[in-house]
Image (cartoon, rainbow, N blue to C red):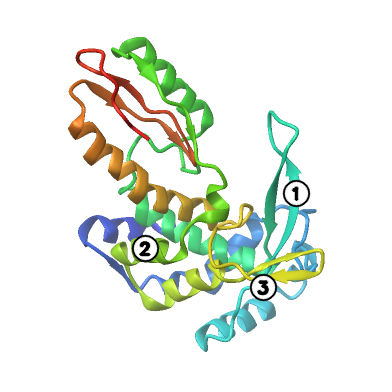
Amino acid sequence: MASAYDKIAQQAARHEKVQTIMHYVNKSNLEEEHRQQEKGKVTGIDRVTKESYGRELGKNLDDLLGRMKRFGYKPQPVRRTYIPKAGSNKVRPLGIPAYEDKLVQGVMRKVLDEIYKGKFYDFSYGFREGKGCHQAISEVQRIIRSKKINFVVDADIKGFFDNVDHEWLMKFLEHDIEDKNFLRYVKRFLKSGIMEDLVRQENDKGTPQGGLISPVLANVYLHYVLDMWFEKAVKGKCKGEAYIVRYADDGAPRMRGSGGETVKAA
């Protein structure tokens, strides 16, 4: 079935940089994003629900698009809450965007997914269509069973989502995207701030977990700083075999040195 975003991937495959992609943030795609939102979800600082926004959906979207065209649209701070961290007694922060911001982020995420699905390495499994945690685990098992593995390095980047460097992330995006308006709104989302206990916090780094656009931005960042480094630098220096399986900010390089030597991966 054809998607409203199919032409983006075609453009990305043909050209070094994609152009004129901001027009995908249009009324039709925003309406579809609204339909896909789940009912009864926790609200952001706007306290707007799918139901309340949908009562005058056409009017609300026309107003949103008008503000976007004149650059009067500014994403609201995400509402920070905390949820239990799987497998431990700790909690992790979760950012909940305002409803209108969810819609815009949802469309922009789909645009970015199309741009990068042909650029990301196959060993990147997090937040990608057709890939997931179970596939990553299966690939780890396959490598261990079928390859000559001497040792495994299990790595988790501490506080990754809260410490992504905005300047470098924008440089990575600019390497693949030539649409100043689209990039301008990506930056606005990065700088939108955090609201916690009625106090607004400015953020000069990080992509808040919970934002619809955050996972693909995290993958773009790690594609350039980790995946390409491993593929082009680490593997080239290894005398033996080296593999990596990455799920979001969790990675597990697996290696075998030709003489049992230690090969540094991370």
Residue 173 is labelled as 2
Residue type (three-letter) at the residue carrying disc 1: Tyr
Q: Is residue 221 left or right of residue 207?
A: left
Along the viewing direction, whichever of 102 and 196 lies nearer the viewer:
196
In percent of width and height, residue 47 lies at: 80, 67
Q: Is residue 7 left or right of residue 133?
A: left
- Secondary element under disc 3, as helix, strand or loop, is loop
Q: CA distance from mark 3 to mark 2?
A: 22 Å
- Secondary element under disc 2, as helix, strand or loop, is helix
Report the residue that reaches farthest toward the front: 262
**Residue identifier under label 1:** 82
Residue at 77% from the left image edge and 71% from the top image edge: 55
Q: Residues within 10 Å of mark 3 (few under 14, many from 20)?
A: many
CB under 8 Å between callouts 1 and 3?
no
**Residue identifier under label 3:** 76
Q: Is residue 183 left or right of residue 71?
A: left
Residue 2 in sight here: no
Residue at 20% from the left image edge and 13% from the top image edge: 259
Q: Given this view, does label 2 or label 1 mark the residue nearer the observer?
A: 1
Q: CA distance from mark 2 to mark 1?
A: 29 Å
Residue type (three-letter) at the residue carrying disc 2: Leu
In percent of width and height, residue 26 lies at: 51, 73
Query: Quick one: quadrant of the C terminus?
Result: top left
CB under 8 Å between callouts 3 and 2?
no
- Sequence-wise, which precedes: disc 3 or disc 2? 3
Residue type (three-letter) at the residue carrying disc 3: Gln
Q: Is residue 84 left or right of residue 234?
A: right
The answer to which image quadrant residue 150 occupies is: top left
- Sequence-wise, which precedes: disc 1 or disc 3? 3
The answer to which image quadrant residue 228 occupies is: top left
Q: Residues within 10 Å of mark 1 (few under 14, many from 20)?
A: few
